[in-house]
Image (tube, grey):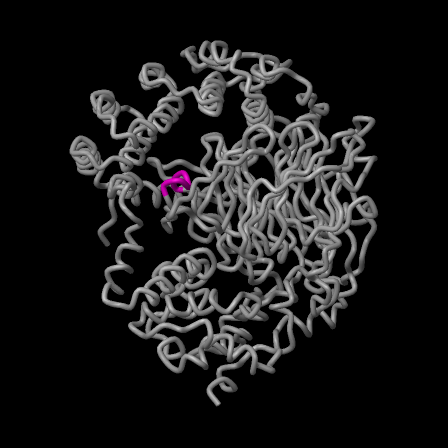
């Protein structure tokens, strides 16, 4: 086998780790980890929080504490804190209240504001900040009393504000508007609203990013090549984002490079066997049925991944910093993954040998979100319920429905818990007090050991729009130290991270000066040099070529990360200088799979896949071409997670596919009416001799949406388009409520 040097290093590194695992029974030696006996058939009994706490299994030294529970919260799905530590919790109060999902689309969901009034770490005051919402899914606190909110089936963003400080929003205005309604399943819609290091706010699914200014003013930037993702979005110290997809059973991807440059997710990003899971309780209620279970009855593979978080706090052991925590609500556990950097390639490996960081024997434990808290600990949102699959997957004929009925999981609704993970050697911090501070008073927090403080301070300074702090920010960014020092009591200060946040805060205030950026090209911290290159992209995009003498020097940098960032940034230029430098970098690092990818193409050109599609349909009628292009965009925002960018199906680790191939499919190439019927109601059972589980119904989408996506996949098979009126006619005559099987459909 002809492996390049980068792959060899990865394989050797992981092999050494594997040997250590087998010998020691674990990978990292901060904790002793004794796996409990597996409970193969647990009851679905609803336990009060105090009893549920006894069901958790954590490594030695770690503890789980209750922060809030029912009746204070009900069906929580995500949380966020404002600058003073007030917690906002979004609830989906209508989610799967019975096995058929009856009444899901009622506008009775809420966002709560929770406050810890006595500082003991447990919330004791709750108010309904916003009522009468339709399944709220994204929240972002801005300044005091301000919250950006998105609801399911909508692209719109609303700014709610509490002007009299009573914990209840009393004004609202729409700050981003898209007239069309987003159709489809509620699980396959956007998540996130993550304020990134680069001051853009990112979501999953949609290829757009936002910039918020004072008063909720929004600027929108659209990219053609961002990862799609599903529920949850997180970032590391450099703003690299980690996506996941439950639909594609993909626990982590998109972190090979920053999302603005597209999705780079080589298979080497996960250690061999990473997708195998190690719950401690039997998992009968898995969508795929028995084939998804081990002999001991536990889940054998990630499936419901949601709400992942790169831990960036300061009140857990130091070796947890930068680790990725992945909640798995179907398996009732949370994976802790180490992020290793092997010649520029980020590789995830399970921190423990054949065990998980946190696992529970309570069948109602449903972790759907995790987040680094202001107090430096790790927070977990537990929806605490029986059913965690939306009604598309629990209908009659599904493998999971009889299990739900047998275990009476449909009866366990209307609850929810929020926990925090602490460690016996660390005391959580007190609540923050940032909202009333001036921009100048916020600046020291740009170097705080806790990433929550750094990002929150940066956001608040930018929203204040106080340009008087620019000289102070420049002074901080000009420093050239890379050592740690004592700061904020016993915490350590990372001067490099402080300079990076100062630089991006300046960018958020509209200050990016060429001479200043050139100076930072020489910073002794390679992380600062990387970010200075990113900040110089505004000059690259403006076709300014006077920086290329500096870029040539950077192309010889000692840091492979710096060289990789240079290659990524130079792709924004179509100049001869950029092409020459990219060619040099690629030739010099041809054995490195990361840099070989980064240096391969220009981002100023159209998306290459889209260009190929346009060439394929060059002679088609204009209306048909428009439909196919729209379908291409829809496909890449939804179907790609299971069927893959090449329409050949996303491969599992064992070589099987998550979903059947669409290229060459006789169902795609055959009768259009039959294809529309399949998409309207979904499909269950074997497809070409393989049981892929359930394909969801797409009938909630409008006729044109369905016609466009089908037109795209048919065009990729050389077949004609589907018209919206054809879909409408079939919809009107469609009396079927359940999934199709192929046998029934073929009749």
In-front residue for pair 707/288? 707
**Residue name at image x 54 percent, y 56 percent:** 180
On screen, residue 400 above or below 541: below
In-front residue for pair 566/120? 566
Q: Quadrant of residue 283?
A: bottom right
Residue 284's spot in the image, x, y percent?
65, 66
Residue 425's spot in the image, x, y percent?
68, 26
**Residue name at image x 61 percent, y 37 percent:** 140
Q: Residue furthest bottom?
A: 747
Residue 572's spot in the image, x, y percent?
29, 36
**Residue name at image x 61 percent, y 36 percent:** 31
Tell me, yes or no, whether the highlighted magenta stretch contains residue 260: yes
Q: Quadrant of the N terminus?
A: bottom left
Evaluate whether residue 517 shows in this view: yes
In-front residue for pair 483/683? 683
Indicate left or right for 634 with 716 as reference.
Answer: right
Residue 646's spot in the image, x, y percent?
34, 61
Tell me, yes or no, whether the highlighted magenta stretch contains residue 481: no
Q: Quadrant of residue 600?
A: top left
Evaluate whether residue 362 shows in this view: no
Q: Which residues are magenta?
A: 256-261
In-front residue for pair 31/196? 196
**Residue name at image x 58 percent, y 50 percent:** 306
- What is the tally of numbered marks visible in this picture? 0
């Amino acid at each position: 086998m002809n492996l390049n040097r980068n792959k060899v290093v990865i394989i050797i590194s992981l092999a050494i780790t594997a040997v250590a695992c087998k010998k020691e029974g674990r990978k990292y030696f901060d904790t002793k980890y004794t796996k409990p006996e597996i409970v193969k058939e647990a009851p679905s009994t609803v336990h009060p929080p105090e009893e549920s706490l006894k069901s958790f299994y954590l490594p030695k030294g770690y503890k789980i504490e209750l922060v809030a529970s029912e009746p204070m919260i009900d069906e929580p799905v995500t949380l966020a804190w404002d600058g003073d530590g007030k917690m906002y919790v979004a609830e989906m109060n209508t989610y799967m209240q019975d096995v058929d999902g009856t009444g899901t689309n009622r506008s009775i969901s809420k966002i709560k504001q929770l406050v810890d009034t006595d500082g003991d770490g447990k919330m004791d005051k709750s108010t309904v900040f916003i009522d009468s919402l339709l399944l709220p899914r994204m929240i972002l606190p801005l300044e005091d009393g301000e919250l950006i909110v998105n609801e399911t089936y909508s692209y719109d963003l609303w700014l709610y504000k509490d002007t009299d400080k009573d914990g209840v929003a009393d004004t609202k205005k729409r700050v981003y508007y898209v007239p069309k309604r987003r159709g489809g399943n509620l699980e396959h819609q956007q998540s996130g609203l993550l304020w990134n290091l680069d001051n853009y706010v990112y979501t999953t699914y949609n290829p757009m990013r936002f910039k918020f200014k004072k008063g909720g003013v929004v600027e929108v930037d659209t990219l053609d090549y961002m990862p799609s993702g599903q529920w949850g979005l997180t970032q590391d110290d450099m703003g690299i984002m980690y996506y996941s997809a439950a639909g594609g059973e993909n626990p982590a991807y998109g972190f090979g490079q920053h999302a603005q440059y597209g999705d780079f997710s080589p298979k080497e990003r996960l250690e061999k066997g990473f997708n195998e899971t190690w719950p401690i309780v039997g998992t009968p209620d898995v969508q795929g049925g028995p084939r998804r279970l081990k002999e001991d009855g536990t889940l054998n593979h990630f499936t419901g991944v949601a709400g992942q978080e790169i831990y960036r706090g300061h009140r857990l052991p130091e070796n947890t910093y930068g680790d990725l925590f992945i909640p798995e609500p179907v398996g009732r556990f949370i994976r802790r993954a180490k992020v290793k950097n092997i010649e520029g390639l980020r590789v995830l490996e399970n921190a423990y040998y054949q065990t998980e960081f946190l696992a529970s024997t309570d069948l109602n434990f449903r972790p759907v979100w995790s987040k680094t808290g202001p107090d430096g600990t790790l927070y977990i949102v537990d929806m605490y319920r029986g059913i965690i699959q939306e009604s598309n997957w629990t209908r009659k004929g599904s493998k999971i429905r009889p299990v739900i009925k047998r275990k009476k999981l449909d009866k366990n609704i209307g609850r929810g818990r929020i926990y925090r993970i602490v460690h016996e050697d660390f005391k959580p911090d007190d609540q923050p007090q940032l909202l009333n501070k001036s921009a100048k008073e916020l600046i020291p927090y740009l170097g705080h050991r806790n990433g929550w403080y750094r990002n929150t301070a940066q956001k608040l300074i930018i929203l204040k729009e106080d340009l008087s702090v620019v000289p102070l920010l420049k002074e901080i960014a000009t420093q050239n130290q890379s050592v740690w020092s004592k700061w904020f009591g016993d915490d350590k200060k990372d001067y490099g991270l402080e300079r990076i946040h100062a630089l991006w805060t300046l960018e958020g205030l509209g200050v990016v000066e060429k001479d200043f950026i050139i100076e930072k090209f020489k910073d002794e911290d390679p992380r600062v040099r990387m970010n200075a290159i990113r900040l110089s992209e505004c000059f690259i995009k403006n076709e300014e070529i006077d920086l290329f003498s500096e870029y040539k020097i950077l192309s010889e940098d000692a840091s492979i990360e710096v060289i990789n960032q240079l290659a990524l940034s130079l792709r924004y230029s179509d100049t001869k200088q950029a092409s020459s430098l990219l060619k040099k970098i690629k030739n010099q690092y041809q054995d490195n799979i990361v840099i070989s990818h980064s240096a391969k193409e220009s981002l100023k050109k159209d998306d290459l896949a889209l260009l190929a599609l346009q060439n394929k349909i060059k002679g088609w009628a204009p209306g048909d071409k428009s439909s196919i292009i729209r379908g291409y965009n829809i496909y890449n925002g939804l179907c790609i997670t299971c069927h893959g960018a090449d329409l050949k199906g996303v491969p599992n680790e064992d070589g099987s596919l998550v979903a059947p191939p669409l290229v060459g499919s006789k169902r795609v190439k055959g009768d259009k009416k039959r294809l529309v019927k399949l998409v309207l109601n979904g499909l269950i059972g074997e497809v070409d001799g393989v049981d892929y589980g359930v394909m969801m119904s797409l009938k909630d989408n409008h006729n044109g949406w369905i016609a466009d996506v089908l037109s795209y996949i048919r065009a990729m098979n050389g077949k004609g388009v589907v018209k919206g009126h054809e879909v409408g006619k079939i919809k009107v005559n469609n009396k079927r409520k359940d999934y199709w099987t192929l046998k029934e459909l073929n009749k």
